[in-house]
Structures are given as C-alpha cells and as structure tokens.
Image (cartoon, rainbow, N blue to C red):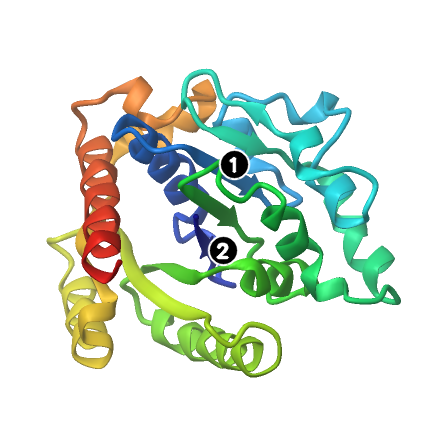
Amino acid sequence: MKILAITNQKGGVGKTTTCVNLAASLVSLGKQVLLIDLDPQGNASTGSGIDKAHLKNSIYHVLIGEKSLKDVVVTSEKGGFDIAPSNRELAGAEVELVNELARETRLKVAIAKLSGVYDYVLLDCPPALNLVTVNALTAASAVMIPMQCEYYALEGLSDLVNTIKKVRAHLNPTLEIEGLLRTLFDNRNMLAQQVSAQLISHFGEKVYKTVIPRNIRLAEAPSYGVPVLSYDKGSKGALAYLELAQEIMHKERKNG
C-alpha cells in the first residue's frame, strides 16, 4: 500500500485538483484507492460529490480517536474511489490534539488498520505546515509536491523540504520526496519555462515528466462534484492526470 502525501503550504497550486483527479485516474487503471481529505475546507470532499455540510462522521473523528477510518469512509460515486471526508470541524483537531500523547501518529495508526485493502492512499494536506500536515507526513511513504512554475514557488519549496527533513529525523525515517508536479502550466509563459528548467536542474529525476496544463475543464469539474475524467474524459486535463497515474505506477514497478 503506497501512502502519498500531496502537500504544499502555498494555496492555489492545484493540490486538491491533483488528489481528486489522480484518485479517479488510478481507479480507471484498475487500482483500489482511498483519498483522505485533511483540509478543513473540505474541497476534495465536495469535488468528489460528497455533501460535507451534513457529514455524521469525518476524518476529524478519526484524528481525535472517536472513530476508525473504516467507520468514516464513503465512496465517491463518480470517481469510483473511497474517501474519508472532511469539513470545518477538522480545524478544531489542532487544538484538541495539542496535549495528547503520540498526537503526530494518529493518522499513521488509523491507516495501518486498513493494510491490504487499498493499493494507494492519497492524503490531501491543508495549505499549512501544522499538526494535521505533520500527521500526514508521518503516515506517508512518500510526498508529492504540486507547484506552479512562478517566481515565489521555489522560496516556499525550501520551507517544505526542511519540514520533510525534520519529520524524517524525528518521526518517519523512510519519508522521501516522490516527486514535484508542475501544475497550472502555461507553455507560452516564459517565466514558467524558466522556473521549470530550474526545478529540473535542481531536483532532476524527482520532477515528474507529466505536466498538468491550465485547463478550463479541470477548473469546471469540481462545481459538478465530479473528477474531470467523468466530466470530460477527452480534455487535456483528464489526459494529463491519466498520464500522471501511469507514470506513478511505472515508477512503482521499477522501484518495487
């Protein structure tokens, strides 16, 4: 079971879009996938067709120890993957967990109980380096960093890399950066091309070959509560995420 934390403390980089559409793409390639929405905004839940306003149980109840992951998981009808949904309640977990023992490993312990059920577990992290993100990094086998190729992108990246190093030193010695994903990419933009070239020269093989383009269909799909594969499977966005899923599976086979 591969557990992939999809994180970047910078908002608006296509993190949730990546989680939902990668989950649907992996399912379409025959994999069993669980998406865990760890953002109090609950956008991954909404984008998967889940009504977050009327949730009885959510990932919040798992983190505070009231429910098991199995109790909160529902299926995204259009996406075909399972999801542990989230809503604003999750914002309270931070405060409630502060004095708890082993608070950084709550998610890791919960996911371990589902060993053998899923091929991939995708963790949609909040755009902050907080206790919930630390839980995700402690539980994960690897990290995917979606990022826009723009001026400030590299600056935020060094903070995240430092956090990953700290988690590796204290909580999760096997944590690796699986890859950097270039999102919202506009080929005509000179700066985007320059930042992309910098990323490749600095991170080499860690940069996914797949590039996610700016695509109107990707932007529209969440308002219908469906992944882009269900909304317009021939769109550039849908094809890019299918390509990403294939690249990840290929990497897995090569390394496995």
Q: Secondary structure at mark 1?
A: helix
Which mark is nearer the camera, 2 or 1?
1
Q: Is residue 229 left or right of residue 6?
A: left
Residue at figure coordinates x 47%, y 61% from the top left: 8
Coordinates of residue 117 in the picture (x, y in percent): 49, 36
Q: Nearer the viewer, residue 249 or 187?
A: 249
Say which amino acid is labelled 1.
Ala
Do we see residue 185 in this rendering? no
Q: Which residue is mark 1?
A: 44
Against 56, residue 43 (above or below) is below
Mark 1 Cα within 10 Å, few/some/many (few <14, many 20+)?
many
Say which amino acid is labelled 2.
Gly
Mark 2 Cα within 10 Å, few/some/many (few <14, many 20+)?
few
Earlier sequence position, callout 2 versus callout 1: 2
Against 152, residue 244 (above or below) is above
Residue at figure coordinates x 46%, y 38% from the top left: 118
Quarter of the figure that contains the C terminus: bottom left
**Residue 11: mark in rendering:** 2
Q: Nearer the viewer, residue 234 or 248?
A: 248
